[in-house]
Amino acid sequence: MSSPALIGSSGDSLREAFGKALSALADEFPNLVVLDADIAGGTGVHHIRKSHPGRFVQFGIAEQNMMAAAGGMAAVGLLPVVTTFAVFCLRAIEQARLSLCYAKRNAKIVASHPGLDVGPDGGSAQCLEDLAAFRAIPGMTVISPADATETALATRAILEFGGPVYMRTGRSPAPHVFGEGHKFEIGKGQIIRDGSDVTLIACGAEVARALAAAQMLEADGISARVVNMATIKPIDRELVARCARETGAIVTAEDHNIHGGLGGAVAEALAATVPAPIEFVGVADSFGSSGEPEELAYAYEIAAPFIAAAARKVLKRKK
Amino acid sequence: MTALPHAIPKNGPANDIAEIELGVSLEAQLAEAARRARMHCLAAIFHAGSGHPGGALSCADMLACLYGAEMNVWPSGADDPLRDRFVLSKGHAAPALYAAAAQAGFCDPKEALTLRKLGSKFQGHPHVLDLPWVETSTGSLGQGFSVALGMALGLKLQKNDARVYTLLGDGELQEGEVWEAAMAAAHHRLDNLCVLIDYNKLQSDAANDSIMKLEPLAAKWSAFGWAVTEIDGHDVEAILSAFRNAAVTTGAPSVIIAHTIKGKGVPMMENVPAWHGSVKMTREQTVDALTALGASAGEIEDLLNV
């Protein structure tokens, strides 16, 4: 009998892009070590395990110990990258708080399997709270890249950045949003499609959906700007203010609870700069359930048509 | 990662342990250092108006041995990669750490009496950004052990021979993370890691036995793959001997289960759970406690009227 095919450990997922990038960067970052809790096949770090076995440290299924140990490894001069699923990062969030952020360690957390993008594993595994939770920790930078290209660039950027970072990747094969010349800078959002009536600000898997929504809106004669807001914290406040000033209405879109994540960060920035009406696309304060990611995007109303609907709704509130 | 040179400077500068008269044994010097550290702890907690005296007094002898004899640490080398590392995983015993470190010249003993006050570097639990020599911030039980393990693992990966020590409370062993770390340290054969357990049998609310039993404790660590030594944690000679055992153990981490008395040295506090928690000490209680520790009227005056 042949071996079973492992789902998702190949293809154009963000986790694979991260894993390949990490392996490619290992020689350039001699202090880089990767910490795994028995899911290297799922997080993409099986690549570096193979290419640089001496940089790969196994912690077993024990995320709290792994997270705090990363603080110790950083304290002795290594550059640790903690890898696990997003939902298991939550069980170690207090370790991230005290032993990484409070102690100001140069350690990175890279979480695969965020949001409804997890799919069939169901509600227990679909982490819809991580952006909010990690954003609330002082000193933590929070990033959610949109596609494989950006994930590879962001992987380099977080290794070059001095300080704790939480970065989401993704489980499922993801559409390509960016071409060769794409640039990524921590803390900077980008207008990836210009428009004048409304701005759709998205991160992660929702960026491709926001672009699709903008096309739907265009068919209705609505000019929608799309912003890729890969850094949730620190939020690019200047860009949020500029979009509010120039388009007068905002929609946020994220594969996350509508509370406390990208939508929360954008709303805070708006309130403090150029107040404008805002609608939030995300999972409406509920848990997920089993299903394929695209089915779930419709079931939980984060697919492109729902972003377009939110834009039409916010336009009615625009002064 | 290149191998680091192996020349490790020994404890350099003079500290007040070394100032004790010549001809006195190391053990006697360390016991005296611990006694004076206990006095300092109680004075700091008195000035703070709150703090955890019981568990600070129970680990004072171990800290005196670590800072006064065992560890290769010296104030001017607080960021030297070759230094040994100590992590106070039971972070609430911070006053005991500050007192021991002050004796070793890492901080000013008078300044350490600002414990728990607004603007003080001597927070209620140690914070590495305030005091770099505390190595990491602790206060959430279980985490310091994991951080120490990460240091030990990281030092091994870098072929650095420095050793890592961490002190855990007994109640702390109820944290699941402790056993995650215990499993990982043995799996990775971290013989550069030495855990000390301040086994004073009492925790915040009551005796370990009534809150959550720990026994058979030595058998548990042994089953997890650790080299176990069980000692009287107030016997300086036994502490030093346990460190020697740990130093020659290869292929496995070492744990020293130190049987101690909570509130050691102050009869009114010994084995009384009420002195664990964050308590406010009156001036009268503090004077009584300092007197019980053998403080002279002049020393009491110096410690309390700052």
Image (cartoon, coloured by chain):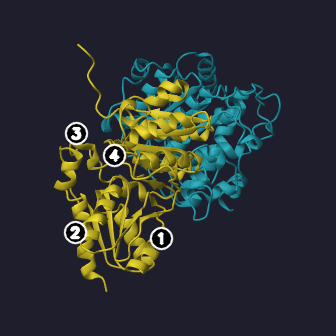
Chain colours: A yellow, B cyan
Callout 4: 10 Å neighbours few (<14), some, many (20+)?
A: some
- Residue A225 picture location, percent across and down: 38, 69
The amino acid type, in three-letter code, at marker 2 is: Ala
Point 29% across, 70% down: residue = A218
> Label 2, label 1: how many angstroms apart (C-alpha)?
23 Å
The residue that disc 4 covers is A174
Image disc number at residue A309: 2
> Label 1, label 4: how many angstroms apart (C-alpha)?
26 Å
Residue B142 appears in the rendering: no
Front residue of A278/A77: it is A278
Q: Quadrant of the N terminus of chain A?
A: top left
Q: Are marks 3 and 4 on the same chain?
A: yes
The amino acid type, in three-letter code, at marker 3 is: Asp
Q: Do labels 1 and 4 share a chain?
A: yes
Query: Image quarter for residue B161?
Result: top right
Callout 1: 10 Å neighbours few (<14), some, many (20+)?
A: some
Callout 3: 10 Å neighbours few (<14), some, many (20+)?
A: some
Specify the subunit that label 4 lies on: A
Q: Which residue lies furthest to the right in this view?
A: B22
> Label 3, label 1: how many angstroms apart (C-alpha)?
36 Å
Q: SS of the residue at dot 2? A: helix
Q: Do labels 2 and 3 share a chain?
A: yes
**Of labels 2 and 3, the one closer to you:** 2
Q: SS of the residue at dot 3? A: helix
Image disc number at residue A239: 1
The residue that disc 3 covers is A121
- Residue B1 picture location, percent across and down: 65, 29
> Label 4, label 2: how many angstroms apart (C-alpha)?
23 Å
**Of labels 3 and 1, the one closer to you:** 1
Question: Which badge, 2 or 3, comes first in the chain's sequence?
Answer: 3
